[in-house]
Amino acid sequence: MINLQKFFKDDDSDAQRFMLPLLPLRDIVVFPHMVAPLFVGREKSVNALTEAMNNDKRVFLSTQKKAGIDNPTEKDISNIGTIANVLQILRLPDGTVKALIEGKNRASIERFIKNKDFFQVELSLVVETDISQAEKVALIRAINTSFDEYAKLNKNISKDLVSSVASITEPSKLADTIASHLSFRMEDKQRLLEIVTLEDRLALLLRLIKMETDIFKTDQRIKTRVRDQMEKTQKNYYLSEQMRAIKKEIGGEEDPSDELKDLEKRIKRKRMSKEAAAKVRHEFRKLKMMTPMSAEATVVRGYIDWLISLPWYDRSKVRKDIEEADQILEEDHYGLKKPKERILEYLAVQTLVRKIRGPILCFVGPPGVGKTSLAKSVARATGRKFVRLSLGGVRDEAEIRGHRRTYIGAMPGKIIQSLKKVGVNNPVFCLDEVDKMSMDFRGDPSAALLEVLDPEQNYGFNDHYLDVDYDLSDILFITTANTLPEIPLPLQDRMEIIRLPGYSDYEKYHIAKDFLISKQIKMNGLEGKNVKFSKNAVLTAIRRYTRESGVRNLEREISSICRKIAREVLQEKESDTFKVTATSVQKYLGPPRFKEVQIEEEDQVGIVTGLAWTQVGGELLYVETLIMPGKGKLITTGKMGEVMQESAQAALSYVRSRAERLAIDNKFYKTKDIHIHIPEGAIPKDGPSAGIAMCTSLVSAITKRPVYRDIAMTGEITLRGRVLTIGGIKEKILAAHRGGIKKVIIPKENEKDLKDIPANVLKQLEIIFVEHMDEVLPHALIIEEGGRLFKDEKDIPFPIMPEEVSQEQRSALI
């Protein structure tokens, strides 16, 4: 082996030169007197160490100018480095070598010697220039002072190192020792290694120590200030960030940057209005500049989620086949002719016109007549999705319009929430129980609905939370209500009112036969069993166990029967046939709750059957009158309202004005007290439609003539005896039909309302139209054979007059 470390004399210089293997370093500068471990992995570097170990264990260490170069050339290696002794070498299993080296002298590369296995260089020792003793002492003292100050700030500097530095008296060794232990930049360390003049080297070291001290002080001051200003939310943030980092390490949570990228992709894919798109982009730019876990970032992220989750242009394909829609409506509901016609009209117009604003319908009717289920059928018939929002008990305007984002926990209103849930912008939107809203200090929700339900405005509905316009004009709004007066008039004006009156017994029977029975058989697990309901059984359940306008209670009774049959199926496993008859209905449901008919058992004096409208449909209303000795006092009981009491006063005034012609004592009101009572006194009653019933009851009580028990009447009376139009005719006539009434007296002006009443009901009733009270009494009062109701023949009411009597003569008689 040739000894490459031998010394030789150059012909042109007296400097001592020698050859050593070169080990290029990355990210470290080795100073003389410095002991450091090196991990060597590059092939040439490993070969250089091997060469050094095979000779006198010396190697030349020089730092690369750029640490990122894996295969450096001569130009990439610093000219000045350190000659070091290799103290120990350890070969690791992965092929790398760990070497422990100790720096000895500075040296400069004179030239590179060609060698394909490793870098080999010719070196010359760097000779330092000395300084005066005074300068030396001053610089050493200044450096020690600065180093002590730095060591007190930086707890990572050990006390042993401070003691060791303080004991060094040689300036070159002091500079190299301190430089090797402080975290200077690589460029600064290389400069310290390359400076030959000792004075310049010590001055540079002093500046670097002071700079590092200032940096450390500034860093400590910043940390102290941040720590002092940190609030509870910031502490939570740091803890959350640590938790996020831990979860990320175990694969439990995505990185926030990934979430932002995903959100940005969703924003680019989402088709929105121009206003909404601009708003989203603006909010997203703000979000990217925020701390991910800050409270404001959560609010902004939630707002963006809402905007991009709404169906701005997503819509259902509307079915335009009128025949198919008609078939679906007929399958789902029996009767309800008028609402079905309106839906089919809408589909017909939509077929002819490409764009039509969705109509706003209001179904008004008693409970159980199928208002909400009809809205679902409309959705099925038109091919739209269905969404329902119950407004019962809503008293906050923000439920409709939403809260502004300045509030904690703010959200859009129920309209926008429902649209996000349904996923299209043209559903059938059912606003249920619109008459049950109320208002308080938080606002009036019915006022907020004015914009929602106005076709001229709802194309630009502005929710407080979104703060951008949203088009509601493609939505088919359907509202439901039990009573119309409870709905504010401005809101009524924006809707098309469609009344759903109560069902007749005939209609209830068909609904039960075609829908309810099969539904309850399926729900109670009786499919496959031969369960039959006879017609009389269904009618018995309708007439003796329910008293309602709809079919909700009827469905409950049928369900109760099916449950009892289900129990019998398990107890009597051999039987598969069950027939429900009128007799077995009592076995399943117990004693009847209502009489089959409600009319009186005999004709009585002073008792008249009136007709009333309620929220659950029509009802029979009895008016009772008693005449007692007294001083002409009129007593009204039965929780009558103010309007009904005024009707009683009008009826009495009419009777007094007609006393002579009715053969009544003109002074009867002075010596008699009159008591008018309407039973079921706990129930409030009001309205003018009982006027003719109270007048008939008065005349019956005064003249002692009985009233036909199978006749019912309704109508408002004036002081002149005219009979005026009233409302709720269909419900009242259906109530009369349910109660076994044979004749019904109604105002002449209500004749037009009979078209809504089923034909089979009209066939079983005799409808009498009247315009004046004098026409009512002959039909209602039982007149003895040969007797006369009126004193003079000229007072015979209009229906009895011969056809040749002129209208002028009729008017003159009144």
Image (cartoon, rainbow, N blue to C red):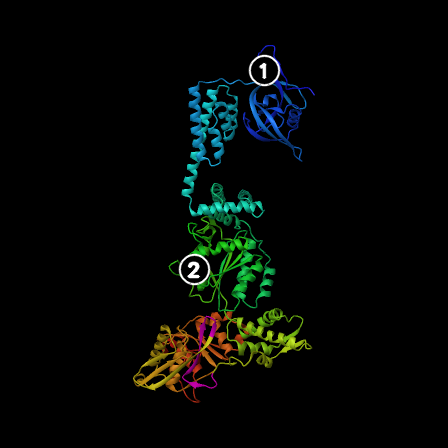
**Which residue position is annotated with label 2?**
491
Amino acid at pointer 1: Gln
Q: Is residue 606 magenta?
A: yes
Residue 722 coordinates in the image, percent (x, y): 38, 75
Magenta range: 600-618
Name the element at disc 2.
Answer: helix
Residue 484 coordinates in the image, percent (x, y): 44, 65
User: Reading the chain from its start, which is encountered first: label 2 or label 1?
Assistant: 1
Q: Quadrant of residue 519?
A: bottom right
Name the element at disc 1.
Answer: strand
Q: Quadrant of the N terminus?
A: top right
Which residue lies most toward the top here? 12
- Please identify the dominant SS of the magenta region: strand
Q: Is residue 251 magenta?
A: no
Q: Quadrant of residue 652?
A: bottom left
Q: Residue at x 31, y 81 (%)?
A: 633
Q: Is residue 118 left or right of residue 494?
A: right
Residue 668 coordinates in the image, percent (x, y): 32, 85
Q: Residue at x 49, y 51 (%)?
A: 471
Crowd rating for badge 1 (residues with CA inside 10 Å; few <14, some 14–19, many 20+):
few
Crowd rating for badge 2 (residues with CA inside 10 Å; few <14, some 14–19, many 20+):
some
Amino acid at pointer 2: Leu
Q: Is residue 177 above or below residue 419?
A: above
Q: Is residue 698 left or right of residue 197?
A: left
Is residue 7 visible in this depiction of the protein? yes
Q: Is residue 311 above or below residue 438?
A: above
Q: Is residue 727 above or below residue 417?
A: below
Q: Nearer the viewer, residue 437 or 6?
A: 6
